[in-house]
């Protein structure tokens, strides 16, 4: 009898634990606990969207080569748009202008001059940031740009003076203007693009 009596408290203890566990199950969940479970359940049911940011991500900083490419398209090619309208105007009048007719007035010289000024401006803005090994190249570009500006300005002034004086430009001189202005334009674009590349690398 004493042994059975000793076992009875243990059994009653286990029964108390079972009752407590049942009470925990029956007890309503706290509001915060229910909210967390609801959010977790919603997240599990919501389909995940594919990550497409990698396909449209733009470079945070453009390289010097990219700067030059944008400059050539946005500045050099855009500066030639007026010649397209001159060409279309000639077609509309029934006279398709040729290479010499388009460039014999020296308009390309004026465009070349502006390109050189732009290249010089790019270099001047980063004078104190250029590496020492690039100083000689920078000086050559600056000097070349200044010489090109002087040549283009004087030649354009001479052509304009001839036109304003009413004198007819000789065919041989018109050919020289067309070929020479194209050469100066290419030289100015090359000089300025090199300046833009150095300036972009120094920023």
Image (cartoon, helix red, strand yellow):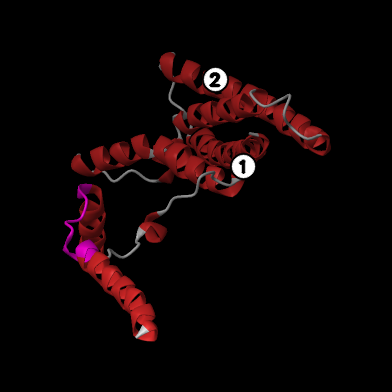
Q: Residue at x 47, y 39 (%)?
A: 76
Q: Secondary structure at mark 1?
A: helix
Q: Is residue 43 left or right of residue 114?
A: left
Q: Residue furthest front?
A: 1
**Can you tell which of label 2 and label 1 is closer to the viewer?**
1
Q: Which residues are magenta?
A: 23-31
Distance from label 2 to label 1 (Cα)?
25 Å
2 over 65 or under it: above or below: below
Residue 26 point in image, percent of width and height: 16, 63
Residue 46 appearing in the image: no
166 over 144 or under it: above or below: above
Q: Quadrant of residue 164?
A: top left
Q: Is residue 5 left or right of residue 74?
A: left
Q: Residues within 10 Å of mark 1 (few under 14, many from 20)?
A: some
Q: Is residue 129 left or right of residue 12?
A: right
Q: Which mark is residue 158?
A: 2
Residue 193 point in image, percent of width and height: 60, 40
Whether the magenta-drawn stretch holds residue 89 is answered as no
Q: Residue at x 50, y 40 (%)?
A: 71
Image quarter of the N terminus: bottom left
């Amino acid at each position: 009898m004493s042994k059975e009596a000793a076992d009875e408290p243990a059994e009653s203890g286990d029964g108390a634990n079972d009752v407590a566990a049942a009470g925990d199950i029956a007890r309503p969940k706290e509001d915060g606990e229910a909210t967390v479970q609801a959010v977790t359940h919603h997240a599990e049911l919501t389909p995940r969207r594919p990550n497409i940011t990698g396909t449209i991500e733009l470079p945070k900083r453009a390289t010097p080569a990219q700067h030059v490419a944008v400059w050539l398209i946005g500045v050099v090619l855009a500066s030639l748009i007026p010649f397209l309208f001159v060409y279309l105007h000639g077609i509309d009048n029934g006279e398709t202008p040729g290479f010499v007719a388009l460039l014999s007035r020296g308009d390309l010289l004026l465009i070349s001059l502006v390109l050189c000024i732009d290249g010089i401006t790019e270099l001047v803005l980063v004078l104190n940031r250029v590496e020492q090994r690039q100083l000689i190249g920078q000086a050559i570009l600056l000097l070349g740009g200044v010489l090109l500006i002087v040549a283009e300005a004087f030649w354009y002034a001479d052509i304009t003076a001839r036109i304003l004086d009413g004198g007819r430009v000789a065919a041989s001189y018109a050919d020289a203007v067309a070929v020479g202005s194209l050469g100066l334009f290419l030289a100015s674009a090359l000089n300025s693009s090199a300046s833009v590349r150095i300036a972009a690398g120094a920023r």
